[in-house]
Amino acid sequence: QVQLVESGGGLVQAGDSLRLSCAASGRAFSTYNLAWFRQAPGKERERIATISWSNGVTSYADSVKGRFTISRNNAKNTVYLQMNSLKPEDTAVYYCAADKGTDWAAPDYWGQGTQVTVSS
């Protein structure tokens, strides 16, 4: 069993940076692949970044590539999302997710989400 709790969201201005954290409980955290999703009002949930458990390989959606960075600290059971050069269109609820495989259509675990609002 893994429980995920996001933090670090807030209201920022366009061009600012923000770092989200997702703290996990559970002894097997290091063996889960991790991802960040976001969902803007009236839009479907979008997977924006993933990081593998085995070798730390990352992937990004085109919408955030070059601006966002996902990382993990297995010793702290935490995954991070560093967000730079934020834009108003980045406004959304951000969720972290964990999966033993790569079934991101239905991850094993979800966090509760944290709101990020970017003003212009």
Image: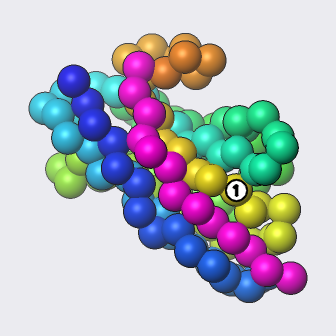
- The spot of residue 76 in percent (x, y) is 20, 54
Identify the amino acid type marked 1: Ala
- Residue 97's place in the image compared with 69, above or below, is above
Quarter containing the N terminus: top left
From where the camera sits, is residue 25 visible?
Answer: yes
Location of mark 1 (residue): 92
For the rendered model, the colour scheme is rainbow
| Residue shown at the point (58%, 62%) measured from the top left | 115
- Residue 76's place in the image compared with 99, above or below, is below
Task: Tell me if 65 is positioned left or right of 36 in this view.
Answer: right
| Residue shown at the point (65%, 59%) measured from the top left | 68
| Residue shown at the point (63%, 79%) measured from the top left | 11
Q: Is residue 118 magenta?
A: yes
- Residue 26's place in the image compared with 39, above or below, is above
- Between 110 and 62, which is closer to the camera in this rendering? 110
- Residue 115's place in the image compared with 5, above or below, is below
- Residues in magenta, as a range: 108-120
| Residue shown at the point (86%, 82%) measured from the top left | 120
| Mark 1 residue element | strand
- The spot of residue 72 in percent (x, y) is 37, 49
User: Taken as a whole, is the magenta stretch helix, strand or loop?
Assistant: strand
- The spot of residue 23 in percent (x, y) is 30, 51
- Between 32 and 117, which is closer to the camera in this rendering? 117
Task: Tell me if 119 is positioned left or right of 84 in this view.
Answer: right
Q: Is residue 104 magenta?
A: no
Image quadrant of residue 117? bottom right
Residue density around tag 1, few if under 14, some if 14–19, many if 20 or more, within 10 Å: many
- Between 72 and 17, which is closer to the camera in this rendering? 17
> Across the whole image, how many numbered discs are drawn on residues?
1
Name the outermost residue toward the left: 27
From where the camera sits, is residue 58 visible?
Answer: no
